[in-house]
Amino acid sequence: MDTRSLPGTGPGPVIIEKPVESPLSAEERGRRTASPAFGTAMTEHMVSAVWSEDRGWHDAELLPYAPLLLDPATVGLHYGQSVFEGLKAFRSPAGEVSVFRAEAHARRFRSSARRLMMPEMPEELFLAAVDSLVGHDQAWIPDDPGMSLYLRPLLFASERTLALRPARAYRFVLLAFVTEGYFGPDQRPVRVWITDEYTRAAAGGTGAAKCAGNYAGSLLAQEEARERGCDQVVWLDPVERKWVEEMGGMNLFFVRGSGADARLVTPPLTGSLLAGVTRDALLRLAPELGIPAEEAPVSVADWREGCASGEITEVFACGTAARVSPVNEVATSTGSWTIGDGRTGEVTLRLSEALTSLQRGELPDPHGWMRPVPPSGRAGGA
């Protein structure tokens, strides 16, 4: 049995590693990950840890991927105390594997837990879990530059009670699957639907937390978008229903102007939308590419009129799953319009290529965003 100590000094907790040999050959694994539907090509292992009032965080283990056994009265199933994250590991052309902005995701995971009255996972435990799982299952990551290993940390209330109060026991699980872009391998432009009937969140609510209920509440509007031939729904503010907030599970960016005059605008964080880690990265990367970037409100009227006048030349969504995804057409209950010439714009392409190149180790990493994870030496099938 191996143990992987947490970073830092002192004894601290450890990840107890109980890996299993891969039941799959390299050829079979390659077949399963050739073009997987998002969230389906799971790897062999997962990390589990538990929290209790009397012991805090304990029993952190890397285990074979397997179903969970839950009591019907598990709090998280009834009252929604459940938060999660999404981050990715990438393989460089030299074969090395690194995780993009793991520390930022660890901080947001803590913030989401805090909002739902759940125990905050120490950053060093979160990172040790990531290192352990990626170290063992990184053989799953194809050499294809369009593919990556998506990591899903989940924390839910596991106490057996139906008392309406914060639970006194919790379970953490980290799992992984191989994926390409959320909208397919070529990141095609997408058509979006602006809903004026449903809202995602309100100031003072849980919009800034990455909690399960936010996503369950979005499904009806997303189905409405699909029925209208759209790929995603765009959420407006919950009060005036005029200010653009975000798109599905992604943040939105608008490009005003073109060429040397191009600049980026993204809606500000108002407390009702998620502070995207990719959003933050692009706000920092754009100026380094000579593209000014700012946070400023954008209304639906601004969007429509800006596209009609040519002031708004490009729009794209961004997120861990979506990467940088161009938006080429907008539909509303009162009509639709095209953005630019309907094709992926120059600024979108530049930012997408810069982000992807950094994540794959093809560009310098001045911000220290990439966390190298060497193979464990016991990764299944490695």
Image (tube, rainbow, N blue to C red):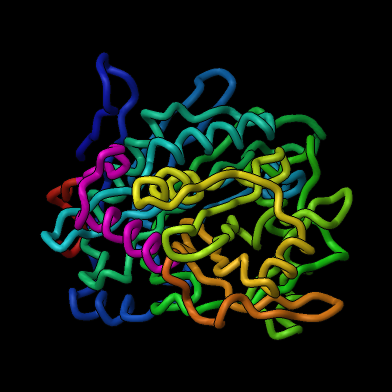
Which image quarter is the C terminus in?
bottom left
Q: Residue furthest top?
A: 10
Question: Which of these two is toward me, 42 or 285?
Answer: 285
Q: Is residue 23 magenta?
A: no
Residue 175 sits in quarter: bottom left
Residue drawn where x is 35% and y is 40% of the image: 129
Residue drawn where x is 24% and y is 34% of the image: 4
Q: For this view, does 121 lie left or right of residue 315?
A: left
Magenta-tinted stretch:
348-373
Q: Position of residue 127 (x, y in %)?
A: 35, 36
Question: Which of these two is toward me, 36 or 10?
Answer: 36
Which image quarter is the N terminus in?
top left
Q: For this view, does 344 lie left or right of residue 35?
A: right
Q: Position of residue 214 (x, y in %)?
A: 71, 52
Q: Is residue 155 above or below residue 252?
A: above
Q: Position of residue 348 (x, y in %)?
A: 45, 66
Residue drawn where x is 81% and y is 34% of the image: 163
Q: Is residue 360 magenta?
A: yes
Q: Position of residue 337 (x, y in %)?
A: 71, 79
Residue drawn where x is 76% and y is 57% of the image: 299
Q: For this view, does 263 lie left or right of residue 61?
A: right
Q: For this view, does 178 lie left or right of residue 314?
A: left
